[in-house]
Image (cartoon, rainbow, N blue to C red):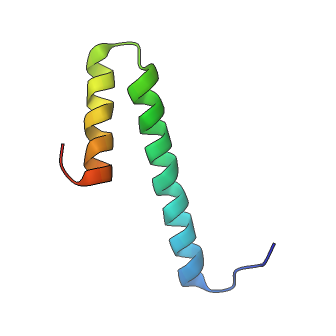
Amino acid sequence: MPTVHDPATLALATSAAGYLLTLATLALTAVAAPSPARRHEARTVLALLLTGRP
């Protein structure tokens, strides 16, 4: 695996990984939350992150 020496590339990769982790967490919450209200809120936030509108 190549080593990344460029700070900008490392910052971009770190932020992209964080964004993907956030999306995965919200998608899991939207499916597996115990209450309908919490599932609805997770779907709303997920839609905002993916499309920019609810």
Q: Residue at x 81, y 72 (%)?
A: 1
Q: Is residue 27 above or below residue 10?
A: above
Residue 30, horizontal then vertical, whole percent: 38, 28
> Could you tell whether 9 is left or right of 51 in the image?
right
Q: Residue at x 70, y 80 (%)?
A: 4
* Residue at the limit of the structure toward the left, as seen here: 53
Q: Is residue 31 above or below residue 12?
A: above
Q: Residue at x 31, y 22 (%)?
A: 38
- Image quarter where the C terminus lies is top left
Residue 48, horizontal then vertical, whole percent: 25, 47
Q: Residue at x 41, y 37 (%)?
A: 26
Q: Is residue 19 above or below residue 40?
A: below
The quarter holding residue 44 reads top left
Q: How many marks?
A: 0
Residue 12, horizontal then vertical, whole percent: 51, 73
Q: Is residue 21 above or below residue 29?
A: below
* Residue at the limit of the structure toward the right, as seen here: 1
> Could you tell whether 2 is left or right of 18 in the image?
right
Residue 50, horizontal then vertical, whole percent: 32, 51
* Residue at the limit of the structure toward the front, as seen here: 51
The quarter holding residue 17 reads bottom right
